[in-house]
Image (tube, rainbow, N blue to C red):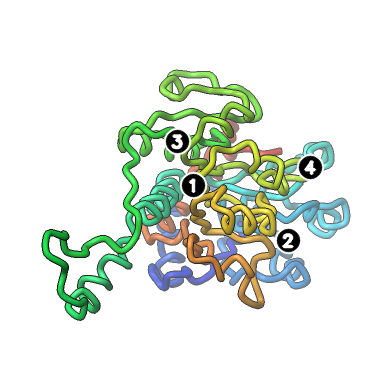
């Protein structure tokens, strides 16, 4: 069996690509039946066919909408397994892929790390640690003397306590679940909504409510919704109008979930107090987005998944999924 793996350099520089490839080889050494293991840098769609060649399995494909087409599969008749190395994926023709005997999986590697980043954005909006640090290091010493009876200036921006506030999780998949667990650790009340009600003891601590109630009640809303035709632009003028005045919005999912023009207006008016965004619409950007000019935002370049620990976990989980498929009990199947 020939397996092709698309492995890029880690966006944070660590681990190096050579180390990641070594980990792939170590993990695959325990998988019987793999005769050939080939590594490539991820190509664009225009260069993908030559690199896949006659592979039986492909790990690391970025699955864009309808990328797995009749024509694509016709060019690779031996291909029986495709794995994206992320949580998200585009539209897949389930009938076509099943008819061709193709299994497609995703890789749930980053629920804890991406949830941690969502909470980090929230805490930074609540405390502005970098601003406080800069004030103490560089500015406090040049302030004029304080008036008698007036306390010295120490706080440069509003400080927000999260205890007893309501954390609304919009999307209760694996990442949303972890973010909810972390919010509970901060003493927050957690409510959530999802396309279908989640069943099982792991979700019992979350009060599952209709979307409109989540919008009305939440002091913080954290987005953990997959991007689809139905979910594009779900945060817009209408949904924002139903939110609490002064709500904090966090997005570590997909930028296109938000109508950024509508969010800009809400941030300017104070309807939304602040937004922490690891993703923006139209990524990768070719120029600064207008929302970057607003001071009540924290915006980063889609890096919540970057820790080295998560990169190595991705390989472990992807190989485990592949091994499970070989053994006849596939996991993380998305088609």
- Between disc 2 and disc 3, the foreground one is 3
Disc 3 packing (10 Å; few <14; some 14–19; many ≥20): many
Residue nearest the observer in this picture, 120 or 162: 162
**Which mark is drawn over residue 167?**
3
Return the x and y of residue 154 as percentages of the image width and height: 21, 63
Residue nearest the observer in this picture, 53 or 120: 120
Q: Earlier in the sequence, mark 2 or mark 4?
A: 2
Q: Is residue 241 above or below residue 24?
A: above
Q: Is residue 65 left or right of residue 191?
A: right
**Which mark is drawn over residue 97?**
4
* Residue in view at x 26 percent, y 60 percent: 155
Disc 4 packing (10 Å; few <14; some 14–19; many ≥20): some
- Between disc 2 and disc 1, the foreground one is 1
Disc 2 packing (10 Å; few <14; some 14–19; many ≥20): some
Q: CA–CA distance between discs 3 and 1?
A: 10 Å
**Which mark is drawn over residue 54?**
2
Q: Quadrant of the C terminus?
A: top right
**Which mark is drawn over residue 248?**
1
- Between disc 4 and disc 1, the foreground one is 1
Q: CA–CA distance between discs 4 and 3?
A: 39 Å
Return the x and y of residue 232 as percentages of the image width and height: 72, 48
Q: CA–CA distance between discs 2 and 4?
A: 17 Å
Q: Secondary structure at mark 3?
A: strand
Residue nearest the observer in this picture, 292 or 320: 292
């Amino acid at each position: 069996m020939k397996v092709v793996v698309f492995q890029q350099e880690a966006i944070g520089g660590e681990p190096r690509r050579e180390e990641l490839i070594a980990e792939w080889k170590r993990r695959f050494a325990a998988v019987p039946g793999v005769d050939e293991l080939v590594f490539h840098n991820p190509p664009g769609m225009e260069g993908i066919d030559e690199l896949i060649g006659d592979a039986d399995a492909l790990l690391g494909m970025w699955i864009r909408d309808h990328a797995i087409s009749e024509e694509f599969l016709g060019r690779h008749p031996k291909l029986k397994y495709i794995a994206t190395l992320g949580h998200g994926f585009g539209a897949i023709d389930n009938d076509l892929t099943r008819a061709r005997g193709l299994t497609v999986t995703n890789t749930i590697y980053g629920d804890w790390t991406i949830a941690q980043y969502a909470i980090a954005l929230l805490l930074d909006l609540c405390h502005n640690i970098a601003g406080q640090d800069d004030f103490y290091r560089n500015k406090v010493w040049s302030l004029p003397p304080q008036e008698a009876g007036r306390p010295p200036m120490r706080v440069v921006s509003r400080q927000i306590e999260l205890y007893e506030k309501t954390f609304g999780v919009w999307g209760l998949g694996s990442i949303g679940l972890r973010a909810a667990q972390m919010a509970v650790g901060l003493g927050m009340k957690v409510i959530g909504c999802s396309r279908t009600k989640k069943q099982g003891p792991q979700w019992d601590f979350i009060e599952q409510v209709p979307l409109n109630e989540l919008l009305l009640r939440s002091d913080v809303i954290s987005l953990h919704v997959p991007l689809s035709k139905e979910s594009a632009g779900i945060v817009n003028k209408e949904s924002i109008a139903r939110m609490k005045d002064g709500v904090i919005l966090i997005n570590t999912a997909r930028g296109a979930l938000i109508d950024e023009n509508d969010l800009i207006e809400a941030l300017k008016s104070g309807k939304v107090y602040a937004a922490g965004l690891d993703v923006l619409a139209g990524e990768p950007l070719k120029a600064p987005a207008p929302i970057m000019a607003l001071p009540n935002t924290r915006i980063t370049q889609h890096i919540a998944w970057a820790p080295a620990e998560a990169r190595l976990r991705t390989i472990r989980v992807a190989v485990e999924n592949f091994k499970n498929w070989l053994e006849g009990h596939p996991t993380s199947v998305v088609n």
